[in-house]
Image: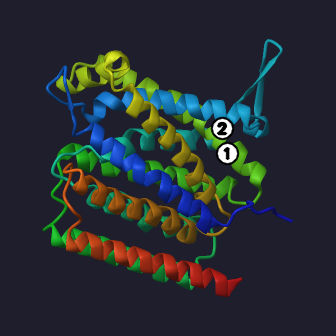
Amino acid sequence: MTRRAALPIETWALLYFLSYAPYAVLVRWLASVPYPAFHRALTGLEILPVTTILSGVFTFLFAWLSGWSRHAHRIHIAGASFPFPTAWTFASGIGTALLLFTVPLSFTFQGVSIPYMQLLMRGDVLLIAPLVDVLAGRRVRWYSWAALGLVALGLSLTIHARGGLRLPPLALLTVLLYTVGYFVRLAVMTRIAKSGDPDMVKRYFVEEKIVAIPLAVLMLALLSLVNFGTQSGQLGFGFIGVWSSGQMTPILLLSLLLFVISVFSILILIDQRENTFCVPIERSASILAGIAAAYVLAQLSLGSLPTNAEMAGALLLIAAIVLLSLGASRAR
């Protein structure tokens, strides 16, 4: 018999929302409030290395102190035992490394609202969820398909209202890399981890993160050494100069929230039900958090209110969540 998590998936989604909303506010605040030494705000690239490093530290401390690391596969070196990934969790770690790049960057593009980026990135993932289920031979229930249709409708309405994607090249690349990373992650998760066993959740989380976090830091470091204009210098500042910038208090809080979000996300996505059920729950929580963050930022004069099209998209997502919950309750 498989074991279920102590809390229902809807509770994890609520906790995810409550963590994600302040995270989105803090990222945009850092990208909007002038940094005195530069006479401008820090860019997403200037805070990306330090947040990746610090959230990784929080993750590894949690895995060790909570005992989750004991559930990972082990390798023995010189009489010592260390957590070690399988080939599958190594592949998932590569996908997760792409997410560690793209999530903070998605909140920092000037002239592009947080709800719009959330709808694009989360909408793309929702569209690939049933594909992963079909490829894995998992059953997709009628209410999951119906909810997926509502989400796709909300996404298309928002894009149409803007007259097309209309994104800077780096923002388009961010959406693409995010979608690829999630596809890899969902495919691996579906194959090896969606069993309902809480020990498998811990094993998967630890093995994925011991690949993703060092890989993300290494890729950022290599990019900072490549001369591709001011952006490489911004990454270099994120590794060295930011520590003495006087901005470490909000960056530390930002990194802690990023770690907390990663825990709640895995507890939602790795639920044993199909991806076409779990992914809309997790994605909708993050989109609604982005909407809430947009209202807070508008009150702080750091952003604009969501447009009518963005709000219509959010309402369709709420309808999708309600449909998923009711459909799952009837099925049980």
Helix, strand or loop at disc 1? helix
Give the position of the N terminus as an image quadrant. Answer: bottom right
Question: Image height check: is 77 above or below 265?
Answer: above
Where's residue 207, x and y in %? 65, 38
Task: Using the image, tell me which numbered label, if any, was put on residue 204.
Answer: 1
Residue lying at the far bottom of the rendered structure: 330
Q: How crowded is mark 1: few (under 14 residues within 10 Å), some or many (20 or more)?
A: many
Q: Residue furthest front?
A: 299
Residue kind at label 1, given as amino acid type: Tyr
**Residue bearing mark 2:** 207
Q: Where is residue 203 in the image (x, y as percent from the top left)?
A: 72, 43
Drawn side of residue 6 relative to residue 229, left or right: right
Task: Identify which residue, 112 or 180, lies in the foreground.
Answer: 112
**Residue 42 or 159: which is nearer the viewer?**
42
For the C terminus, the quadrant is: bottom right
- Residue 245, percent across and down? 31, 20
